[in-house]
Image (tube, grey):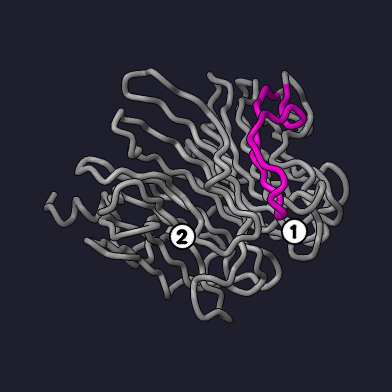
Amino acid sequence: MPLGAFKAALMGTAGVSTGDVVLLTSTTGSGVSEIDFSSKITSTYAEYIFRFYNLGPATDEVNFTFQVNATDGADYNDSAITSTFFRAFNYEDASNAALGYEAASDQAQGTAFQILSAALGNAADKSTAGELHLFNPSSTTYIKHFYSRMNEYHVSEAGVTRDQFVAGYINDTTAIDDIRFKMSSGNFDGTIKMWGVK
Amino acid sequence: MAMTLIQSQTASSASSVSFTSGIDSTYKLYIFKIINIHPASAADFTWQANAAGGSGFNETITSTAFRTYHTEGGTSAGPGYNASGDQAQGTAYQWLGGSVNQDNDESASGELFLFNPSNTTYVKHFYSTLSYVLDSGGPLAYRLDAAGYINTTSAIDEIDFKMSSGNIDDGTIKLYGVG
């Protein structure tokens, strides 16, 4: 199989259907401050899945986050989010492991960027990966539910894996058509793909 | 992972949503996508299975359920086990979410994975995630994760979704096969 064909089979090709899940956009950033999806979020699909591949920050101990912009909004700051955040972690030397809630990463009607992966390290081999499900963003009846799961190589020098679970809703009955992903500070590298589920 | 849409059903004041065809040996994984299920009154959103040749949605299930929540007022949050949502060899409808609220802008969305339902050697594993609004001491974001097995080696070919009481006022459930 030629390299290009293998890559397409592995990663998907924008606009090409994998059954009834359609890859809509794939964006690879290198030293970018944010990655926006400002088109193709429409009523065509009732669920959108964002997958994150090796997002590596330039700055140490930053959070990977998202916010949305409603069709009546001017920026990524006017949709209140109520969310939950819990995580499991384990140290490479097995000295510590636990499951717990992380209040610093949730929101209660907040308009800040929602944390999906917290306290990332910027070492060369550190990154975060996972996925975010966003349900029916074009609905004008219901608020918008989402949930995510991301694993990260934590900032700690000890070497820590963290499995992070976020869920909640964007408390807005206006259609959502834009979404932005960024680090809480600094630039990042990596690939984000957006899929529509028929 | 290629997903194929097999069937989509939209409920409108329906007592249940049943998938009585399309679950067979064609796929080893079936995913139900739950989009904006809105109950007529606050109730648990649940499902059960019927084995091939069986006569009712009453298979034996052993399951776990845990949840995390956060109030809009920020007054309370946390993860924990949710014993109301599990079963120990029970034949009741299995929780996808408990006390899903019915305000006009509130609903529940998520997914249910059912593995190899047509297998006649093994019990049938499943897991689900549901994100919704629960109205207990103020609106709160609630996520419920359930998992377990349908303790039968008979093939499963039907799944039924319903509220623990009252109708499903609105919402869509889609069934996908994963090749």
Is residue B95 within the magenta segment? no
Question: Residue B120: x and y, percent?
Answer: 55, 22
Please indicate whether residue B82 sits to the left or right of residue B116 in the image.
right
Amino acid carrying label 2: it is Phe
Query: Which residue is drawn at the image coordinates 72% and 54% (left, top)?
Result: B73
Q: Closest to the observer: A176 or A47?
A: A176
Please indicate whether residue B168 sits to the left or right of residue A91 in the image.
right
Q: Closest to the observer: B49 or A169?
A: A169
Please indicate whether residue B28 sits to the left or right of residue A23 in the image.
right
Amino acid carrying label 1: it is Ala
Does residue A76 show up? yes
Query: Which residue is drawn at the image coordinates 79% and 65% (left, top)?
Result: B104
Mark 1 element type: strand
- Magenta stretch prevailing secondary structure: strand
Asked if residue A54 is positioned above or below residue A92 in the image, the reply reads below
Q: Closest to the observer: B137 or A3?
A: B137
Query: Which residue is drawn at the image coordinates 58% and 21% (left, top)?
Result: B123
Task: Identify the mark at residue B11; answer none if there is no mark.
Answer: 1
| Marks 2 and 1 belong to one chain | no
Specify the segment rendered in magenta: B61-87
Please indicate whether residue B112 sits to the left or right of residue B16 in the image.
left
Question: Residue B136: x and y, percent?
Answer: 81, 46
Query: Which residue is drawn at the image coordinates 49% and 60% (left, top)?
Result: A113
Q: Quadrant of residue A31?
A: bottom left
Mark 2 element type: strand
Q: Which residue is mark 2?
A: A66
Question: Residue A182: x and y, percent?
Answer: 38, 61
Q: Residues within 10 Å of mark 2 (few under 14, many from 20)?
A: many
Q: Looking at the image, is mark 2 or mark 1 nearer the viewer?
A: 2
